[in-house]
Amino acid sequence: MSYIRFVTAPGVCKTLMEDETKSSEKQNPNVTRAAGIVSIAVMGSRVLGLAREVAIRYYFLSGVGADAYYLAFRIPNFLRDLFGEGILSKAFITTFLATEGEEGEEAAWNLANRIFNLIFLILICITALGIIFTPAIVDVLARKDFDKNLDTPRHYGFDSKIELTIYLTQLMFPYLLFVSLAAIAMGLLNSKGKFGIPACASSFFNLSSLLIGISGYYFFQWAGIHPTTGMAAGVIVGGIAQFAIQLPFMYRVGFRYRPLLSLRNPRVQQVLWLIGPAVLGVAAVQVNQLTNTFFITSGSGWLTWLNSAYRIMHLPIGIFGVAISTVALPQLAKFTTAGDTENFRTALSYALRLMLTLTVPASIGLMVLSEPICRLLYERGATNEADTLATAGVLFVYAFGLSGFSALKIVTDGFYAYQDIRAPVIVGICAVALNICLNYLFIYRELFLDPRAVVFSTVLTVTLNCAVLLRLLRRKTGRLGLRPVVPLTLKVLIASAVMGLVCWIAKGVIEQDWLGTEGIVARVSSVFGPIGFGVLTLAGMYKMLKVTEFDDILEVFRYSLRRMRNARQI
C-alpha cells in the first residue's frame, strides 16, 4: 500500500490518499487552494445576490410585482443557466485544452475567436426571437391563477400581471447575450488556471442589478413607470459588467480578438456537438426549474417563495458545488487528454469527498435554521410572517437536495472530461420526464397541492440523476476510487447530526427563553448564534473523527492568512 504526501502549504505535508502517482501530489493541493479562492469569490457574489433578493421582497408584494419579476427573469435566466453557467463553459474548456495540447496555443486562440463570434451571432438571433415570442412563452408558463392578484385595475398602465411579466421579460432578454459571452470568457480564463476573476465577475452583476434596481424603483415610480423596470434595467447592466470585467484579464493571458468565423472547423464542430445534444443532459436542474414554473404559478406567491428559498440554497451550492466543479473540470480534462485514468479517478474521488465534507453539514444547518434565516432576510416591508413560514418550508425541502445538486455538477464534469455526452443526455431527459410526472400528480391532480411538492420532485429527480450518472461513469472508467467515500460519509453524517442538535438547542434557547423573534438583535442572534455553536461543534467532531479533508480545508485558510500577512509586511 503506497501513500502520497499532500502539500497544502510550503513546508506543510499531510498523508491523505492511497495509490497515487507523483503527479497527483501537485494536483490535489491545487484543487483545494483554487477551490478556496473560487469559494470566497462565489460567496461574495451569492451574498450580493441574497441582498438583491432581500430588496425585491422588501419593495414588492410576493403575489404581485415580485411574482411578475421572477417569472420574467426566469425565462432568459433559464437560457443563461443552460448555456452560460453550464454547457457553454464546460464544452469550451474541454475543447480549448485539447486543442492547445494537440495543435498548439495559436490554434487554441483561433478556436476561442471562432467560438466568440459564432456564439455572438447565434445569441443575437435567439434574443430577437425571444423578444418576439415572449407573449406566447409567458402564456405557456403562467397558469390562470397566476394572474388573479394584481392589486389595482390598472397598475402603472398594466391591466394584468401577465402583461407586466411580458413587459419585463422583453426588457431583460438581451441579458442572455452578455452573460453567455461572459461564460466563454470564464471558460477561457479557467483553462489558463485563472479562477478568482471569473468567479468574482458575477459579483459585478449582482452589485449592478442591486444598486440600479433600488434606485430605479424610486426613479421609475416617480416617472409613472412600473417600479420593477428598475430591476429589469439592473439585470441588463449587470450582464454587461460581468462580461466587461473579464476582458482585461483575457488580454493578459494572451487572447487577441480576431474576426474569425467557421462552421467547418473541426474544433468548432466539436464544441457545437458538445453543446447541442447535451442541453438536457448536463442541465437537468435548469430544465426542471423551467418545467416547474408551470406548476409553481398554480398559487399566488408560490413563485416568490420558491425563488427566495432557492436563492438561499444557491449560496452553499455556489460556495461548495460550483467552486469545486469549476476547479476540477480543467484537471479532469487534462488527465483524460493524457490518458491518465488513475489520476482522473483520484481527482474525481477527492472532489466528491471534499464536496460531501462541506455540503452535508450545510444541508443539516439549513433544515434546522430555515425559519430564522428566512425571517432575518425577508420579513420586513411587503413581506409578512406568512411569507416567512412558507419560504422556510420550501427551504427545508430544498436543503435535502444540496449534496445532490452539488455532486451532479462534479459527476457531469467527469463525462465532459471524456467528451462523452450520451449518458448525461439520456439520464437528463429521463429525470426531466420523471419530474414532470411527479408535478402532474402532486399539483395538477391535486394529490399534494403545496409548493413544497414541486421542490420535492426536483430534489428527488436531481439526486437520482446524480446516482445513475455516477454508476455509469464507474462502468466507463472501471472503478472510481470511491471506497474512501463510504467511511467519510458515515463520519460526516455523525458529525453533522451532532452539529444539527446543537444548532436546534441553541435556536430554541435564543428564541424561546432569551430574545424572542422580534427585532434585528433577536433575529441576528437566532441565526448566527446557532451557526457559531454549530461550526465549533462540527470542527470538534471532524477532529475527533479524523476527517482529513477538513484538515485540508483548514490548511488552505491558514495558508491564505499567512500570504495576507506577508503581503501587508511587504
Image (cartoon, rainbow, N blue to C red):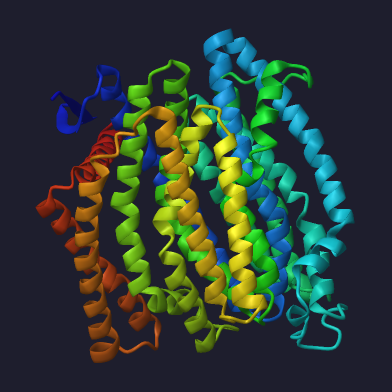
> Residue 315: x, y in percent?
45, 58
36 or 209, which lies in front? Answer: 36
Residue 516, relative to residue 97: is it above or below? below
500 or 510, which lies in front? Answer: 500
Location of the C terminus by quadrant is top left
> Residue 29: x, y in percent?
29, 31
Horizontal side of 402 relative to 85 (left or right) equals left
- At horizontal 86% and vertical 63% (from top left) the residue drawn is 136
> Residue 366: x, y in percent?
37, 68
- At horizontal 19% and vertical 62% (from top left) the residue drawn is 536
The answer to whether residue 563 is visible is yes
Circle count: 0
**Residue 98 found in image quarter:** top right
The answer to whether residue 249 is visible is no
**Residue 483 found in image quarter:** top left
Residue 427, relative to residue 90: is it above or below? below
Horizontal side of 83 relative to 8 (left or right) equals right
Location of the N terminus by quadrant is top left
**Residue 506 found in image quarter:** bottom left
> Residue 120: x, y in percent?
77, 34
- At horizontal 89% and vertical 55% (from top left) the residue drawn is 132
Horizontal side of 246 relative to 140 (left or right) equals left
Direction top: furthest residue: 103
Direction left: furthest residue: 544
